Image (cartoon, helix red, strand yellow):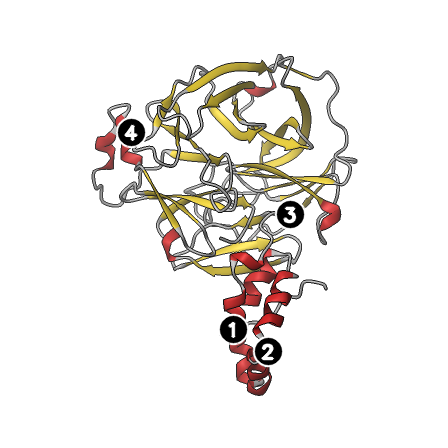
Amino acid sequence: MEAVLFPCPRNREASHPQTMANWAELPIDLINEIAKRVKVIEDFIAFGAVCTSWRTAASKQNFDVLSPQVPLLMLGAKDDDYREFYSLSKKKVSRIFLPEAGGRECLPSEGWLCTVANNTGEMNLLHPFSRIKIQLPSRKDLLSFHGLDYLERAREGKRWHCIDKAILSANPSLTSDYTLLVHYYGGGSCLAFWRPGDLNWTEIDVVTDGGVCNMIFCKGQFYSVSYCGEVWAYDIAGPSITQPSVQTRLLAELEDDMFKLPSVQFYLVELSGALLLVTRYAIKSIGEDPNGTFKSFKFKISELDITKGKFKEEDLKTLGDSSIFLGRNGASCVDSSKFSGIKPNHIYFTDDWLEYGRNEEGGAGRDMGAYNIEDGTIESFYPRLSNLMVADDWEASPE
């Protein structure tokens, strides 16, 4: 059975009340069987909006949380209790009631959002569909490591942004054995982690002077890449070890000087067990954009040999049926053959040039598109609707 996008019940009820009543009167066993056959998260959410009995069937138990999902693009916040997500496969925007995300930075990972309150520094893991929250130590606790906790004092008209990345080792919906790694600025580039049961963050000594550009969890370890092209590995003790501890090592380093350009970004992504480094090149589009935001024009993919601690000599020229998604908080890879509307051998990217155009009139969020690895062409898409902040990639799963 093909997954079907069911319409909003309010519209149906207004025009076909008898049809609506018939849907509600279907046997619950049949409704449960229908729910189990819906494989796409967006359709599953719409399924639960049909009526009360269908909403009851739209539970975690009736959805295969391990089924592959196309990452949704999380758009910039607006001044209401909703957040918007753009579906590449359906080419449309969905609005989700999520007041818990209001006035907060949202960093997506493993289908959850790490939220940071702009005014108080309160931090949580938030599931955007069930709206379940997991309380984390606060931003003030992070800043206290560096004697900067005074920055949390109320300051009229000002917001303190210091946390820009958060990566989970596993989905909290599936296991309690996970670790959250965050990158923040506390007088420099800083890392810290938290595990369920820990009372506070544990700080990690960051050796690189290049800052952390991107992070990933792959094969049981966290990895980061700096703006200077250094790849570091972090072996963090699991929750079975009471005392939090971490071992760090420099894994590999780029030898050329391309990273000296301000318009280069790095991303780490896993593809079929291999760790890849994606390099994104951009130019400042002053002539086309009065805000002077960046415009990506080329991508390069390098494979990292974890055992030998060096990059393979030949760049990766094809992804086969796979596609890579790049965003502010990380990168992911999907098999495009399993989804409609997703092109194989492409790199989909959102605008994550945080330092540029963020506070300009009209905002940022314009550098979004799909890069064809075979011929190097770029198809720009959805350039106008994300004009408040940057868009994040976010892989969804129900709680």
Disc on res. 53: 1
First in residue order: circle 3 vs circle 1: 1
Q: Which residue reaches farthest bottom?
A: 18
Q: Quadrant of the N terminus?
A: bottom right
Q: Secondary structure at mark 2?
A: loop
Q: CA distance from mark 2 to mark 4?
A: 55 Å
The spot of residue 398 in percent (x, y) is 52, 54
- Identify the image quadrant of residue 186: top left
The amino acid sitting under disc 1 is Ser
First in residue order: circle 1 vs circle 4: 1
Please report contact status of discs 3 and 2: CB closer than 8 Å, yes or no.
Answer: no
Q: Secondary structure at mark 1?
A: helix
First in residue order: circle 2 vs circle 4: 2
Q: Is any atom of residue 205 visible in this view?
A: yes
- Depth order, front residue of 312/186: 312
Q: Secondary structure at mark 4?
A: helix
Label 3: which residue? 68
Q: Which mark is in front, 1 or 4?
A: 1
Residue at image x 45%, y 56%?
A: 130
- Identify the image quadrant of residue 220: top right
95 vs 144: above or below: below
- Depth order, front residue of 308/209: 308
Q: CA distance from mark 4 to mark 3?
A: 37 Å
Please report contact status of discs 1 and 4: CB closer than 8 Å, yes or no.
Answer: no
Q: Which mark is in front, 3 or 2?
A: 2
First in residue order: circle 1 vs circle 2: 2
Q: Is any atom of residue 281 visible in this view?
A: no
Q: CA distance from mark 3 to mark 1?
A: 26 Å
Label 2: which residue? 26
